[in-house]
Amino acid sequence: MRKKGIAILGSTGTLGRATLDVVRRHPERFRVVSLSCGQNTSLLLRQIEEFRPRYVTVLSARLSEKVKREVSSMAGAPEVGHGREGLRRAVSVRGVDVVLVCVVGMEGFLPTLEAIRRGRTIALANKETLVVGGPLVMKEARKQGVRIIPVDSEHSAIHQLLKREKKRAVKRLILTASGGPFFRMPLKKLRYVTVEDALKHPVWNMGRRITIDSATLMNKGFEVIEARWLFGMREEKIGVCIHPQGVVHSMVEFLDGSVLSQMGHSDMRIPIAYALGWPERIASGVEGYSPENTTLEFFPVDERKYPCLRFACESLRLGGSAPAVLNAADEVAVDMFLKGMIKFIEIPVVIEKTLTEHLPWRLASPEDVLEADRWGRKKAMEVVKGL
Ligand code: MG
Protein backbone atom coordinates (compact mmCIF):
# COMPACT_ATOMS: atom_id res chain seq x y z
CA MET A 1 0.00 0.00 0.00
CA ARG A 2 1.29 3.45 -0.90
CA LYS A 3 1.65 5.65 2.19
CA LYS A 4 -0.49 8.76 2.49
CA GLY A 5 1.70 11.86 2.52
CA ILE A 6 0.71 14.26 5.30
CA ALA A 7 1.35 17.98 5.71
CA ILE A 8 0.58 19.44 9.15
CA LEU A 9 0.14 23.18 9.47
CA GLY A 10 0.56 23.97 13.16
CA SER A 11 2.39 20.79 14.20
CA THR A 12 3.54 21.97 17.65
CA GLY A 13 0.10 23.07 18.93
CA THR A 14 -2.33 20.83 20.81
CA LEU A 15 -4.01 19.54 17.64
CA GLY A 16 -0.75 19.15 15.75
CA ARG A 17 0.69 17.02 18.54
CA ALA A 18 -2.51 14.95 18.73
CA THR A 19 -2.23 14.42 14.95
CA LEU A 20 1.35 13.18 15.22
CA ASP A 21 0.22 10.87 18.01
CA VAL A 22 -2.27 9.26 15.59
CA VAL A 23 0.32 9.17 12.77
CA ARG A 24 2.84 7.49 15.10
CA ARG A 25 0.42 4.56 15.54
CA HIS A 26 0.28 3.90 11.80
CA PRO A 27 3.78 3.98 10.33
CA GLU A 28 2.63 1.63 7.55
CA ARG A 29 -0.08 4.08 6.44
CA PHE A 30 1.31 7.59 6.75
CA ARG A 31 4.42 9.51 5.93
CA VAL A 32 4.93 13.04 7.26
CA VAL A 33 6.01 15.17 4.30
CA SER A 34 5.92 18.67 5.75
CA LEU A 35 5.47 20.41 9.09
CA SER A 36 4.85 24.01 10.02
CA CYS A 37 5.03 25.74 13.36
CA GLY A 38 5.13 29.26 14.78
CA GLN A 39 7.91 29.70 17.29
CA ASN A 40 8.31 26.43 19.19
CA THR A 41 11.43 25.35 17.28
CA SER A 42 12.72 23.03 20.02
CA LEU A 43 9.63 20.83 19.69
CA LEU A 44 9.79 21.14 15.90
CA LEU A 45 13.38 19.84 15.96
CA ARG A 46 12.29 16.78 17.93
CA GLN A 47 9.46 16.23 15.43
CA ILE A 48 11.95 16.51 12.56
CA GLU A 49 14.15 13.85 14.13
CA GLU A 50 11.26 11.49 14.68
CA PHE A 51 9.26 11.96 11.47
CA ARG A 52 11.92 13.05 8.94
CA PRO A 53 9.78 15.46 6.88
CA ARG A 54 10.97 16.73 3.52
CA TYR A 55 10.03 20.34 4.29
CA VAL A 56 9.46 22.43 7.44
CA THR A 57 8.51 26.05 7.89
CA VAL A 58 8.47 28.49 10.81
CA LEU A 59 7.17 31.98 11.54
CA SER A 60 10.16 34.20 10.76
CA ALA A 61 13.42 34.33 8.79
CA ARG A 62 15.38 34.52 12.04
CA LEU A 63 13.80 31.30 13.34
CA SER A 64 14.32 29.54 10.03
CA GLU A 65 18.08 30.38 10.18
CA LYS A 66 18.18 28.85 13.64
CA VAL A 67 16.43 25.64 12.48
CA LYS A 68 18.70 25.43 9.42
CA ARG A 69 21.80 25.53 11.65
CA GLU A 70 20.40 22.83 13.91
CA VAL A 71 19.52 20.42 11.10
CA SER A 72 22.61 21.08 8.97
CA SER A 73 24.50 18.02 10.26
CA MET A 74 21.46 15.76 9.95
CA ALA A 75 21.38 13.14 7.18
CA GLY A 76 18.39 13.88 4.91
CA ALA A 77 17.82 17.28 6.56
CA PRO A 78 14.59 19.00 5.51
CA GLU A 79 14.42 22.17 3.50
CA VAL A 80 13.45 25.06 5.82
CA GLY A 81 11.17 27.99 4.95
CA HIS A 82 9.34 30.74 6.77
CA GLY A 83 6.34 33.08 6.74
CA ARG A 84 3.44 33.05 4.27
CA GLU A 85 5.59 31.69 1.45
CA GLY A 86 6.70 28.86 3.73
CA LEU A 87 3.08 27.83 4.38
CA ARG A 88 2.35 27.91 0.64
CA ARG A 89 5.32 25.68 0.03
CA ALA A 90 4.42 23.31 2.90
CA VAL A 91 1.13 22.39 1.22
CA SER A 92 2.54 22.19 -2.30
CA VAL A 93 5.73 20.13 -1.87
CA ARG A 94 5.82 16.84 -3.77
CA GLY A 95 4.19 13.88 -2.04
CA VAL A 96 1.55 15.69 0.02
CA ASP A 97 -1.85 13.98 -0.23
CA VAL A 98 -3.61 15.32 2.87
CA VAL A 99 -3.15 18.72 4.49
CA LEU A 100 -4.12 18.98 8.14
CA VAL A 101 -4.88 22.60 8.85
CA CYS A 102 -4.41 23.03 12.61
CA VAL A 103 -3.17 26.63 12.64
CA VAL A 104 -5.34 29.03 14.58
CA GLY A 105 -6.79 32.21 13.16
CA MET A 106 -6.83 33.92 9.77
CA GLU A 107 -3.39 32.45 9.05
CA GLY A 108 -5.18 29.26 8.00
CA PHE A 109 -7.22 30.78 5.20
CA LEU A 110 -4.74 31.39 2.36
CA PRO A 111 -2.70 28.17 2.74
CA THR A 112 -5.93 26.13 2.79
CA LEU A 113 -7.07 27.79 -0.42
CA GLU A 114 -3.64 27.08 -1.94
CA ALA A 115 -3.83 23.42 -0.87
CA ILE A 116 -7.25 23.12 -2.53
CA ARG A 117 -5.88 24.63 -5.75
CA ARG A 118 -3.16 21.96 -5.64
CA GLY A 119 -5.83 19.25 -5.35
CA ARG A 120 -4.85 18.11 -1.84
CA THR A 121 -7.42 16.52 0.45
CA ILE A 122 -8.11 18.91 3.32
CA ALA A 123 -8.51 17.84 6.94
CA LEU A 124 -9.79 21.07 8.38
CA ALA A 125 -9.42 22.06 12.02
CA ASN A 126 -9.00 25.79 11.36
CA LYS A 127 -12.30 27.62 11.98
CA GLU A 128 -11.65 30.84 10.16
CA THR A 129 -11.21 29.27 6.72
CA LEU A 130 -14.91 28.46 6.27
CA VAL A 131 -16.24 31.19 8.55
CA VAL A 132 -14.57 34.02 6.64
CA GLY A 133 -14.41 32.57 3.15
CA GLY A 134 -16.99 29.75 2.99
CA PRO A 135 -18.45 30.45 -0.47
CA LEU A 136 -15.01 30.99 -2.06
CA VAL A 137 -13.46 27.93 -0.44
CA MET A 138 -16.33 25.60 -1.37
CA LYS A 139 -16.41 26.89 -4.95
CA GLU A 140 -12.71 26.19 -5.36
CA ALA A 141 -13.07 22.76 -3.74
CA ARG A 142 -15.87 21.83 -6.16
CA LYS A 143 -13.84 23.08 -9.10
CA GLN A 144 -10.81 20.99 -8.12
CA GLY A 145 -12.83 17.99 -6.94
CA VAL A 146 -11.22 18.30 -3.52
CA ARG A 147 -12.71 16.83 -0.37
CA ILE A 148 -12.79 18.84 2.85
CA ILE A 149 -13.04 16.54 5.86
CA PRO A 150 -13.81 18.37 9.09
CA VAL A 151 -11.70 17.77 12.19
CA ASP A 152 -13.88 19.75 14.60
CA SER A 153 -15.71 17.18 16.78
CA GLU A 154 -19.23 18.43 15.88
CA HIS A 155 -18.66 18.49 12.14
CA SER A 156 -16.80 15.20 12.23
CA ALA A 157 -19.87 13.73 13.94
CA ILE A 158 -22.20 15.04 11.23
CA HIS A 159 -19.81 13.92 8.48
CA GLN A 160 -19.93 10.42 9.96
CA LEU A 161 -23.73 10.49 10.28
CA LEU A 162 -24.30 11.66 6.72
CA LYS A 163 -21.93 9.16 5.13
CA ARG A 164 -24.48 7.16 3.18
CA GLU A 165 -27.44 9.52 3.28
CA LYS A 166 -29.10 11.58 0.58
CA LYS A 167 -29.31 15.28 1.34
CA ARG A 168 -33.04 15.38 0.79
CA ALA A 169 -33.50 12.81 3.58
CA VAL A 170 -32.01 15.23 6.10
CA LYS A 171 -34.44 17.39 8.00
CA ARG A 172 -32.12 19.12 10.43
CA LEU A 173 -28.58 19.15 11.76
CA ILE A 174 -28.31 19.54 15.54
CA LEU A 175 -24.99 20.81 16.82
CA THR A 176 -24.35 20.20 20.51
CA ALA A 177 -22.74 22.82 22.74
CA SER A 178 -21.38 22.36 26.25
CA GLY A 179 -22.87 25.71 27.25
CA GLY A 180 -19.50 26.78 28.67
CA PRO A 181 -18.76 27.59 32.31
CA PHE A 182 -21.80 29.90 32.73
CA PHE A 183 -24.54 27.61 31.55
CA ARG A 184 -26.00 27.27 35.05
CA MET A 185 -25.33 30.89 36.03
CA PRO A 186 -28.35 33.23 36.13
CA LEU A 187 -28.36 35.83 33.36
CA LYS A 188 -27.97 38.84 35.63
CA LYS A 189 -24.80 37.46 37.21
CA LEU A 190 -22.98 37.41 33.87
CA ARG A 191 -21.99 41.05 34.34
CA TYR A 192 -19.62 40.11 37.18
CA VAL A 193 -17.77 37.42 35.25
CA THR A 194 -13.95 37.67 35.36
CA VAL A 195 -11.37 36.54 32.80
CA GLU A 196 -10.41 33.70 35.13
CA ASP A 197 -14.03 32.46 35.40
CA ALA A 198 -14.44 32.55 31.63
CA LEU A 199 -11.28 30.56 30.99
CA LYS A 200 -12.59 27.51 32.88
CA HIS A 201 -14.11 25.28 30.21
CA PRO A 202 -16.07 22.32 31.63
CA VAL A 203 -15.22 19.70 28.99
CA TRP A 204 -12.46 20.60 26.54
CA ASN A 205 -9.02 21.95 27.23
CA MET A 206 -8.32 24.51 24.50
CA GLY A 207 -6.70 27.83 23.62
CA ARG A 208 -7.81 31.09 25.27
CA ARG A 209 -9.88 32.61 22.48
CA ILE A 210 -11.84 29.44 21.73
CA THR A 211 -12.51 28.96 25.45
CA ILE A 212 -14.06 32.45 25.66
CA ASP A 213 -15.90 31.78 22.39
CA SER A 214 -17.35 28.65 24.02
CA ALA A 215 -18.52 30.67 27.03
CA THR A 216 -20.38 33.16 24.78
CA LEU A 217 -21.49 30.38 22.37
CA MET A 218 -19.89 32.37 19.54
CA ASN A 219 -17.85 29.25 18.89
CA LYS A 220 -21.12 27.42 18.19
CA GLY A 221 -22.18 30.30 15.95
CA PHE A 222 -18.99 29.82 13.93
CA GLU A 223 -19.76 26.11 13.77
CA VAL A 224 -23.23 26.83 12.36
CA ILE A 225 -21.52 28.88 9.62
CA GLU A 226 -19.03 26.08 8.94
CA ALA A 227 -21.83 23.48 8.84
CA ARG A 228 -23.72 25.64 6.35
CA TRP A 229 -20.80 25.39 3.91
CA LEU A 230 -19.50 21.91 4.70
CA PHE A 231 -22.87 20.19 4.32
CA GLY A 232 -24.65 22.64 2.00
CA MET A 233 -27.49 23.19 4.50
CA ARG A 234 -29.32 26.46 4.93
CA GLU A 235 -29.03 28.06 8.39
CA GLU A 236 -32.69 27.48 9.26
CA LYS A 237 -32.01 23.73 9.05
CA ILE A 238 -29.13 23.92 11.51
CA GLY A 239 -30.08 23.86 15.20
CA VAL A 240 -28.07 24.01 18.40
CA CYS A 241 -28.78 22.38 21.74
CA ILE A 242 -26.91 22.49 25.02
CA HIS A 243 -25.44 19.20 26.16
CA PRO A 244 -23.22 19.79 29.20
CA GLN A 245 -21.63 16.31 29.25
CA GLY A 246 -20.08 16.71 25.79
CA VAL A 247 -20.51 13.03 24.92
CA VAL A 248 -22.90 13.42 21.97
CA HIS A 249 -20.87 15.42 19.48
CA SER A 250 -23.83 16.23 17.22
CA MET A 251 -27.01 14.76 15.76
CA VAL A 252 -28.87 14.54 12.47
CA GLU A 253 -32.65 14.37 12.20
CA PHE A 254 -34.00 12.57 9.13
CA LEU A 255 -37.39 12.91 7.44
CA ASP A 256 -38.57 9.54 8.77
CA GLY A 257 -38.26 10.77 12.35
CA SER A 258 -34.95 9.04 13.07
CA VAL A 259 -32.38 11.07 14.94
CA LEU A 260 -28.82 9.70 14.77
CA SER A 261 -26.02 10.81 17.04
CA GLN A 262 -22.31 10.20 17.32
CA MET A 263 -20.86 9.70 20.79
CA GLY A 264 -17.36 9.50 22.16
CA HIS A 265 -14.93 10.82 24.71
CA SER A 266 -13.84 14.44 24.34
CA ASP A 267 -10.53 13.58 22.74
CA MET A 268 -9.56 15.22 19.45
CA ARG A 269 -7.66 12.13 18.32
CA ILE A 270 -11.04 10.61 17.36
CA PRO A 271 -11.95 13.22 14.70
CA ILE A 272 -8.28 13.45 13.67
CA ALA A 273 -8.05 9.69 13.06
CA TYR A 274 -11.36 9.79 11.18
CA ALA A 275 -10.11 12.56 8.88
CA LEU A 276 -6.68 11.01 8.31
CA GLY A 277 -7.99 7.50 7.70
CA TRP A 278 -11.01 8.50 5.63
CA PRO A 279 -12.74 6.65 3.96
CA GLU A 280 -11.46 3.92 6.27
CA ARG A 281 -11.63 3.89 10.05
CA ILE A 282 -8.32 3.55 11.86
CA ALA A 283 -7.32 3.26 15.54
CA SER A 284 -7.03 6.61 17.30
CA GLY A 285 -5.65 5.47 20.64
CA VAL A 286 -8.89 6.42 22.41
CA GLU A 287 -11.14 3.92 24.18
CA GLY A 288 -14.83 3.82 23.29
CA TYR A 289 -17.35 5.61 25.48
CA SER A 290 -19.29 3.30 27.85
CA PRO A 291 -22.84 4.49 28.43
CA GLU A 292 -23.35 2.51 31.65
CA ASN A 293 -24.02 4.57 34.76
CA THR A 294 -23.97 7.89 32.97
CA THR A 295 -26.62 10.57 32.45
CA LEU A 296 -26.88 12.65 29.31
CA GLU A 297 -28.81 15.92 29.38
CA PHE A 298 -30.01 18.21 26.59
CA PHE A 299 -31.38 21.74 26.97
CA PRO A 300 -32.59 24.45 24.60
CA VAL A 301 -30.39 27.54 24.10
CA ASP A 302 -31.45 30.66 26.01
CA GLU A 303 -31.05 33.33 23.34
CA ARG A 304 -30.97 36.21 25.85
CA LYS A 305 -28.00 34.65 27.54
CA TYR A 306 -26.21 33.73 24.34
CA PRO A 307 -26.94 36.48 21.77
CA CYS A 308 -23.76 35.68 19.80
CA LEU A 309 -25.39 32.61 18.32
CA ARG A 310 -28.05 34.81 16.75
CA PHE A 311 -25.42 37.22 15.33
CA ALA A 312 -23.74 34.31 13.57
CA CYS A 313 -27.01 33.28 11.90
CA GLU A 314 -27.69 36.90 10.96
CA SER A 315 -24.27 37.21 9.36
CA LEU A 316 -25.08 34.16 7.23
CA ARG A 317 -28.34 35.75 6.08
CA LEU A 318 -26.49 38.98 5.27
CA GLY A 319 -23.97 36.90 3.35
CA GLY A 320 -20.79 37.94 1.49
CA SER A 321 -18.32 39.70 3.76
CA ALA A 322 -20.58 39.71 6.87
CA PRO A 323 -19.30 36.47 8.50
CA ALA A 324 -15.70 37.65 8.06
CA VAL A 325 -16.62 40.91 9.82
CA LEU A 326 -18.36 38.92 12.56
CA ASN A 327 -15.19 36.89 13.09
CA ALA A 328 -12.95 39.96 13.14
CA ALA A 329 -15.22 41.78 15.61
CA ASP A 330 -15.27 38.73 17.88
CA GLU A 331 -11.50 38.40 17.82
CA VAL A 332 -11.09 42.05 18.82
CA ALA A 333 -13.80 41.85 21.50
CA VAL A 334 -12.35 38.67 23.06
CA ASP A 335 -8.85 40.12 23.00
CA MET A 336 -10.07 43.31 24.71
CA PHE A 337 -11.91 41.23 27.33
CA LEU A 338 -8.80 39.13 28.02
CA LYS A 339 -6.80 42.36 28.45
CA GLY A 340 -9.35 43.66 30.97
CA MET A 341 -10.48 46.51 28.70
CA ILE A 342 -14.14 45.45 28.41
CA LYS A 343 -16.56 43.31 30.42
CA PHE A 344 -17.68 39.82 29.47
CA ILE A 345 -21.20 41.04 28.69
CA GLU A 346 -19.76 43.72 26.38
CA ILE A 347 -18.32 41.11 23.99
CA PRO A 348 -21.71 40.67 22.21
CA VAL A 349 -22.25 44.45 22.28
CA VAL A 350 -19.05 45.05 20.31
CA ILE A 351 -19.93 42.33 17.81
CA GLU A 352 -23.49 43.52 17.26
CA LYS A 353 -22.53 47.18 16.80
CA THR A 354 -19.79 46.28 14.34
CA LEU A 355 -22.06 44.01 12.32
CA THR A 356 -24.90 46.56 12.24
CA GLU A 357 -22.62 49.16 10.66
CA HIS A 358 -21.39 46.81 7.96
CA LEU A 359 -22.75 46.87 4.44
CA PRO A 360 -21.67 43.47 3.13
CA TRP A 361 -19.89 43.03 -0.17
CA ARG A 362 -19.65 39.96 -2.39
CA LEU A 363 -16.61 37.73 -2.02
CA ALA A 364 -15.11 37.46 -5.48
CA SER A 365 -11.49 36.91 -4.45
CA PRO A 366 -9.39 36.16 -1.34
CA GLU A 367 -8.54 39.87 -1.19
CA ASP A 368 -12.25 40.66 -0.58
CA VAL A 369 -12.08 38.37 2.47
CA LEU A 370 -8.91 39.97 3.84
CA GLU A 371 -10.45 43.42 3.28
CA ALA A 372 -13.54 42.41 5.31
CA ASP A 373 -11.25 41.17 8.08
CA ARG A 374 -9.38 44.49 8.19
CA TRP A 375 -12.63 46.48 8.08
CA GLY A 376 -14.13 44.44 10.94
CA ARG A 377 -11.08 44.82 13.18
CA LYS A 378 -10.87 48.56 12.64
CA LYS A 379 -14.57 49.11 13.21
CA ALA A 380 -14.63 46.87 16.30
CA MET A 381 -11.75 48.85 17.84
CA GLU A 382 -13.70 52.05 17.25
CA VAL A 383 -16.74 50.50 18.94
CA VAL A 384 -14.60 49.42 21.93
CA LYS A 385 -13.24 52.96 22.29
CA GLY A 386 -16.77 54.37 22.16
CA LEU A 387 -18.18 52.11 24.92
MG1 MG B 1 -16.24 22.21 18.23
Image: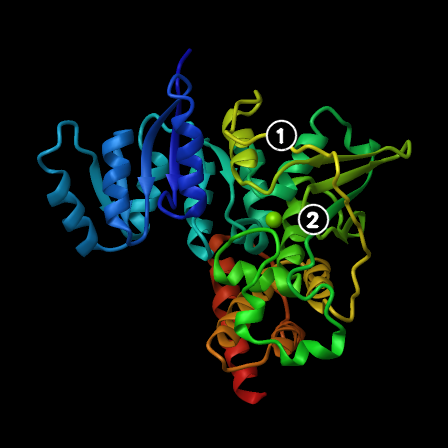
Residue occupying image coordinates x 91% and y 31%? 256
Q: Which image quadrant: the N terminus?
A: top left
Percent coordinates x, y for residue 343 in the rendering: 59, 80
Estimate the x, y position of residue 296 in percent, counting from the top left.
Answer: 77, 45
**Residue type beneath disc 1:** Gly
The residue identified by callout 1 is 288
Examine the rendering and report whether any part of residue 145 can be seen.
Answer: no
Q: Nearer the viewer, residue 166 or 72?
A: 72
Task: Please tell me whether residue 250 is drawn above or below residue 344 in the rendered image.
Answer: above
Residue at 23% x, 41% y is 45
The total number of labels drawn is 2
Asked whether 184 or 213 is in front, the reply is: 184
Q: Position of residue 383 (x, y in %)?
A: 57, 82
Name the residue beneath numbered marker 2: 245
Q: As shown in the figure, which amino acid type bears the numbered disc 2?
A: Gln
Pick out the residue farthest to the right.
Answer: 256
Q: Name the spot of residue 101 as percent of width and height, x first.
A: 45, 42
- Left or right: residue 157 versus residue 241 is left
Position above or below: 353 against 158: below
Q: Which quarter of the picture shows residue 261?
A: top right
Secondary element type, mark 1: loop
| Most distant residue in the front direction | 293
- Which badge, 1 or 2, comes first in the chain's sequence? 2
Asked which quadrant contains residue 168, the reply is: top right
